[in-house]
Each structure stands twice: as C-alpha cells, then as structure tokens.
Image (cartoon, coloured by chain):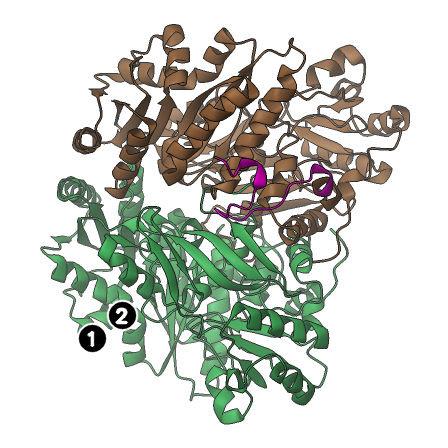
Chain colours: A green, B brown
Amino acid sequence: MNSLVEPNLRHTEQSFSASPVLDALHSVLPTHCILHREEDTRPYECDGLSLYRALPPIVVLPETEEQVIAVMRVCKRLSVPIVARGAGTGLSGGAMPHAQGVLLGLAKFNRIRRVDPVSATAVVEPGVRNLAISEAAAPHGLYYAPDPSSQIACSIGGNVAENSGGVHCLKYGLTVHNVLRVRVVTVDGEVVELGSEAPDAPGLDLLALFIGSEGMLGVVTEITVKLIPKPACAQVVMASFSSVETAGQAVTDVIAAGIIPAGLEMMDRRAVQMVEPFVKAGYDMAAQAILLCESDGTVEEVAHEVERMEAIFGQAGATRLQVSRDEAERLLFWAGRKNAFPAAGRISPDYYCMDGTIPRRHLARVLGAIEQMEDEFELRCANVFHAGDGNLHPLILFDSNKPDEVERAEKFGAAILELCVQVGGTLTGEHGVGMEKINQMCVQFSRDELEAFLAVKRAFDPPGLLNPEKVIPTLARCAEYGKMHVHGGELRFPDLSRF
Amino acid sequence: MNSLVEPNLRHTEQSFSASPVLDALHSVLPTHCILHREEDTRPYECDGLSLYRALPPIVVLPETEEQVIAVMRVCKRLSVPIVARGAGTGLSGGAMPHAQGVLLGLAKFNRIRRVDPVSATAVVEPGVRNLAISEAAAPHGLYYAPDPSSQIACSIGGNVAENSGGVHCLKYGLTVHNVLRVRVVTVDGEVVELGSEAPDAPGLDLLALFIGSEGMLGVVTEITVKLIPKPACAQVVMASFSSVETAGQAVTDVIAAGIIPAGLEMMDRRAVQMVEPFVKAGYDMAAQAILLCESDGTVEEVAHEVERMEAIFGQAGATRLQVSRDEAERLLFWAGRKNAFPAAGRISPDYYCMDGTIPRRHLARVLGAIEQMEDEFELRCANVFHAGDGNLHPLILFDSNKPDEVERAEKFGAAILELCVQVGGTLTGEHGVGMEKINQMCVQFSRDELEAFLAVKRAFDPPGLLNPEKVIPTLARCAEYGKMHVHGGELRFPDLSRF
C-alpha cells in the first residue's frame, strides 16, 4: 500500500463560505431544490444517532440524476464535502452533515420504477422506503426480504449505504445478498453501473464493495433488488430459559440441526422487563432470556420445522414453550422485539443502541461482562440480539440532562464494542461505523488493513470529498485514541482482559 | 476516476533475464522451492484452458507465509510479474504463466489447520482441495457447500480467486457466501486479514472484493470457510420436456413457488445424447431438454418438496418424471451432469467450455441462437446449464488438429458470450475472465466502469505486477477489439442483432 495520506482531515480547519457554493449550485439546480436558511436546514442536523449534530450550511434535494451529476461536479470543482442522506434513520451518524459541506438529500428519488414478477426483481430509486418495495410487490405474491426494524421509514438507498440487516436476514441474507445492481454517480459526476440482473458479474465485485460503503464511494441513483415469494405460512416458537447460557446453547443446537430459521432473536431479562409492560406481547417476565424462533414455508414444512424446534428447545432446557396460534399472535410475539427501542424510550429519557457481533459461543461471557460494566459505568443496559447471526444490540439507558451521563454512555458503548472485537467479533453488525465507531476501527484493524481501506477510498474519491471524517480513521487519529489493534480472539487488550 | 494508465501493458515488450531474479529468489527460498529448467517448468505452462500456453521462466513453490512475503518483495523490487496458481484446474486461463514472470504455486500450502464443529468453520491453507475440506468435516456431520465439477482436484485458493460455484450454489451460495475470512499477502509483502469469523465485518467489504479477484489484488495464504450440516436426506427429480421453452418455464415455475432447490440443472438434447451412452445414467434420449432438480433436508421435508416439484413439472408439461429411489440412483442421475465435460472429450478431440449467464426468461431465445451459430461456425455445441442461476455452459466441440477449427471455436465462444451480455446477462458465471474473456469485458462494461476496476486494481497493486494482462482490458485493447459496450438488454450490438 502507499503511505497514508489523510484526506479525512483536509476540510476541518478551513473556514467555509457558503455563497460561492450557493451561486454555483443555483446555476445547476432549481431554487426549490436548495435550502440554506437555518430554519430549513435545521431538520437535517443529525440522523438517528442524535448524540452527534452539525448544522449543514447547504442542503440540496435534487430531483433527477442529471442534477445529482451537476451537484457532484460543482462540489468537486470547489472542493466541498458531500454527505448523502436517505431517510436519516441511520444509527451510526453516517448521514450526519459536514459543517463545511453540502448535504445531498435523496428524498425526492422516491419512485418505484418497475416491479417485474417474471424475473422477480424491482427497479427503485434510492429514496423509496424499504417497506414500500414489499407493498408494491405484494400483488404478485413477492416481497423484499431484508427488514430492518426501521423498515417503515428507512430508505433503500440508506440500506445500500449501511448493508442493512433485520430479523429475516439469517435465512434470506443482508442487503448485499438481495441487491443485484446499483447505478452510481461518482465524485467526478460519472455514472457507473455495478452488478447485473444475472448473478455474479465479471471482474472485481464492485457491487459488494459499494454496498455498505457508507456514502464514501459515490451516490446511488437507482437500485435493482431481488424479490422473493412470500411464504404461505409462518409461525414463531417462543421459548423461555433460566439462563443466557442455556438460551445460547439452544441457538447453537437449532443451527447444528441444519435448521435455518426465518428469524432467531434473543432478549435478556432486562429487555423483556422493559418491553412487556409496554407491548403486552405475552413475554415471560420470569425468564432470564427468551428466544423467538420463526419458521416459514408451506403449511406442512412449517408444522414439521416447528415440531423440530420445540423438541430442540425442550432438550436444551426451555422452561416455557409457546407457538404462535395465528398470524395475529405471530405479529404480537414480534411486536415486543420490534418495539424494544421505543420501549427503552418509555423507561429512560435517552438510550444508546449499540451494534456489535460476536462468535455465538462467547454470548454468555459477553453478556456477563456487560452486566459488570453496568456497575462500572453506573448505567443500565438491556440486550436484544439477532442470536442466529451473533449480532448483539445492547441498549444503554441514560439521561442526557445529567451532565456526565452522555460521556459515560459513550464510554460504556465503546467498551462493549471493544469487548466484541476482543472475543473475535466485530464492532458493527448492521448499523455501520459512521461517526460513532471510527475510534473502534483502530482496535478492529491493523495499520496495513486501514491503509487498504484508504487506498480503495482514494481509488473512488481521490479528493476525499464523499462523507469525509467518517468510517475509516487515519493513523494519526488511532495514535491519539491510544488503543491497540487486536486480532480475533487474541487477548492483547489490556483494559478489558478482566472480563 | 483518474485517467487511464495501462499497467497491464507494461511488461510485455521488455526482454526478461531470469538470472538476477533467480539469484534474488535463491537468497530467500530453499533451492528445492525454485524450478527454472524447462523440464520442471513445462507442467505449469497452462491451466484448464489449454488453448493458451506460456512457459514460465521461473516457478516458485513456497512452503511458508514468510517465503511468500519474501517472493513478493523480490518481485516488487525487480518489477517482475507474479502469477499465483492453485491446482491449475481453472477454465479461463487465470493461472496461465507470464512469459517474463514468476509463477507462484501454492501446492505446498495443503494443510487443514483446524475444523471447529462448534462454530462450524474450518481454517485451511489455499492449496487444500475443495473436496478434502468436506472430507475433513464429515466426522462432525458438516461439509463445505460450493461444489465445482472439479471439486476432487481444484484448490480452495483457486475457488477464492474465481468465486467458484457448483450445482449446490443455487441454495447455498457461491464461494463469496461461504468464506468468512482470508489472510492475504499484498504486492508489498504486507499481510492483511479481510473479513471475520463474525458476519459482516465493518468498513468496506474488502473480503467480497477479494473473492473472485483472479489473482490481481494479492496472494491468499489462509482461508476460514463456513461449514454447514450435511442434510439427512436428498432426492433428485428428473424431468423430460419436449422443448427448451417448456423446460425453462418449469424452472421459473419451481422458483416462483418459493422452492429453492439444492440444485437445478438443465441439459439440452445434444448434451443428453453426448452423455448418456458414456455414463448410462438413464437419461431420456428422446427429450429435447431434461431437468435435474434436487431437494435436501429431513426425510419429511424432502418427501413434501419432491411432491411439490413433481406437481409443478407435471403441470409445466413434463413428458417423463422420475425420482431417485435411493442414494445410488441419486448419484447416478448427477453422474451424467458431472461427467458432461469428459463425455465431450469422448466424442470430440477437443471441447471449449463457455460460461455465460443470462436472465432465465431469455433461455429459449439464447439456445435457439446458439443452434443457428452452429451452422455459421460449422461446429457443434452441447448445452449444460445451472438453470436456477441462469448460468449457461455451452460446450463447443472442435478438433485442434484441423487448422481453422481453433479459431472458429474461439469466435463461436466470443459470439455466445456477447449474446449473453446483449440479453442482459454477463460473460462469466463462475469460471472467471482470465485471459479468455478479456476482450468481451469491453462489451460488458463502459469506459467509466473499466476505469473503476483499474482504479481499485491500482489501489492494491500500484506497479501492476499481480497477474498482469488479464481480466481488465485497457481502453487501447478495447479500441483494437472494436466492439461497443452494451448495457443490459439494450440491443445496440450490431453483429448479433439478427438473433
């Protein structure tokens, strides 16, 4: 790799004068597509990670690909950072504006261009909501599988940027497994198409590289997604366990039996006790952990698979077992899980949702360590968990009006992520790195690995204008953060070795 | 993107003096790891695409990662091209040596380092044979899913380089979906780890970028693969059809019913007639096309799914239906498909196996066009087809002793691939681009898209030493080839518009 240049630091120390940029943008966009007064730009100051805010001096809302191209050319010419934004539901600050840049909102790219039931694909614009795709495909008996909890609001463009998951991703894959092709405007204002309607495009897999690239490589203007047939039937098995360990073993047992559940989620005692009074989903308040395990397929397939799941959970020591009797009950069982975040908001002024992955065998150890950290940081934490994928979502509860709680919540979150890396996991499963986890990238990756990221970033964005100061830390930043890189499972991380 | 430099052309016009390179290699490798006499290097002159040959002046067979690093450093310092090679079974010339370079064979990296039944993973060296991984995992009831026809011989390192598929990939994914982590030596002799044991590593998805990168970005020294539980039961439904169209419709119908077969293969009349006398698999010699459709799972699941498959094929107009009665018959049904290539060798002195993908709806049209091309190029062609994936394998039969047949076979192959692109498909499904399809890349991709590939290539390999003159054509080469880029389904391709 080349020596490390630091494009991410380039723009921070300059003062920013909006007027020449505004003048240039007015020459290529209609007036109603440009916002620059504070009352208009204020709504864009943060995404779902509201801890971090920056007022964007200029927001553009282009309506055509030609306008996106024109915006990119203006920004490149004037060396102005560009941050793309979908629905702004992201949880890692990926769409947080740059204080000296242009925020490029894609809300007006909201058309579903084509639903093709023969090839089982849809061609959509990036501002289309995730759930709207499934709604448009429903008359053909099809749907779009990845289902983030925010699917009613989040945009497919944002899903592409973050490689979003959801409870169905265990069986049906992440965004990267369900997108066939994207059309991208580069920082130079060129248009490239990555991927193809046919599987496995030749040459380097730039489609997979682009998905999850968090706005660093280009701006998407069109997406072809894969649709799949809606299963005839789905049922959820809900199982209670007297410890996190036994619940974790039950997860391993189901997967070892060759079953790929349509969803497999765990909630710990604190999460159940937070959610149940709010949602009244019938969760077992006495359990230390509950599992929700879904089967889908034909009626016969589901009956057979549910029977196997029940047997496995029973053998693993489930203290209570319940199977959804109808669709209403199935949705009720899921409602608790899907409302874990709003439920946190009911019992705590603020909450901070983390997103780390761990090898499943370390589940009990990691949850035990998080419990110890609750004492250390004097904050409570509830855990919901895409158990099949090993993707943990600790919800740290805090009150931002108490002066030091924000800082303690941030430190608690960082400690959890670094523990995930320490046991051989990663610091994000599906929410992205964004602003939030950039320091932890120093822990996850070596110098040479970070240089590989930066080299690829430079290949697409030589001037470093696309979503700068996010995702990939410079080595200077890592030196300042002062924590070492650890590799999968090797306990070279002094702060956390006691867990 | 930057303006186009042409690293691939850099080395062709230089004369090559082996002795300084040999001296430098002898200083870092034991003598028995270096081959340079013609009788020793001759076996490495081609891979499975034996149409293209080049004698490598030097072959190195390192035994440790440190030696691989040392070889890379020597080659970088002396500006010598490096071509990595696994088992040499590739079909697109990806491992064809460079006449002025070093061939880096990984045959001695043949250890299975760890099989972990708890996490269902294996850590292996790149020279391990694909099938050997499943054999090592079998005592735990696990196996490695991707199963190229060459799985008895091909290496997992080569599978990573080509993103190999196989009949089970419809249900279980390509190599990219079954590899969790790779350890890579870069052209600078640095070691990076891409991916993680946990799903979805943060930052750019360099693992997916690396898989299928055909030796252009680095050399793999260790691979962590996912293992999956071996299903309790598998059965194959074999169905005959009176036309390719009805067989194609039956494929669409099965998938539209929400069934994901463990394998779904089509053979046309010529392929059946070529294979059956050789293998005696019980194929219907009267059929215009046969389908092989596999179900796997528990006994009950398979019984239920096979019943559904039979009903769908019956409704689609199958003229004969047969279900494998036992494991021996299931393997016999597959034996015909898996031996299509050797069977071609029995009836023709040479054959040329193509590998294009098409949207399934164009199947009948494409096979019809290939039949017309048989007259035009005066050569026969049999078709086997990963029908579920839309991945076509036309086998062009020719005799290399007849002077112009090689040329006609190559032109026939190019015409087929360009037709695949024209109908919205791609020029390779699973065999890679290599030497073979580099000209067709000019048809598949636009100037800006090829520049994006080259920019990423340069990010990993600034001096352009890794597998040069393959995969990504320079614009000069495209200009010389003289064919235009077409985009998915748009018929702007003059030569083939008559089909």
In this view, the mark in front (1 or 2): 2
Report x, y in % for residue B137. 41, 27
Q: Say if the magenta span includes residue B494.
A: yes
Q: Residue furthest left?
A: A325
In which quarter of the view is residue A372 placed? bottom left
Q: Which mark is residue A165?
A: none
In which quarter of the view is residue B269 placed? top left
Residue corresponding to mark 1 = A278
Report x, y in % for residue B311. 16, 31
Q: Is residue A344 visible?
A: yes
Is there a contact, CB below 8 Å, between mark 1 and mark 2? yes
- Look at 38% across and 12% down and name the residue there: B273
Quick one: label 2, few (<14), some, or many (20+) residues within 10 Å? Answer: some
Left or right: residue B432 versus residue B239 is: right
SS class, disc 1: helix
**How many numbered callouts?**
2
Residue corresponding to mark 2 = A339
Vertical arrangement, residue B475 with respect to residue A355, above or below:
above
Could you tell me the amino acid type at mark 1?
Phe
- Please report whichever mark, 1 or 2, sits nearer to the chain's N-terminal start: 1
Magenta stretch, residue numbers: B479-498
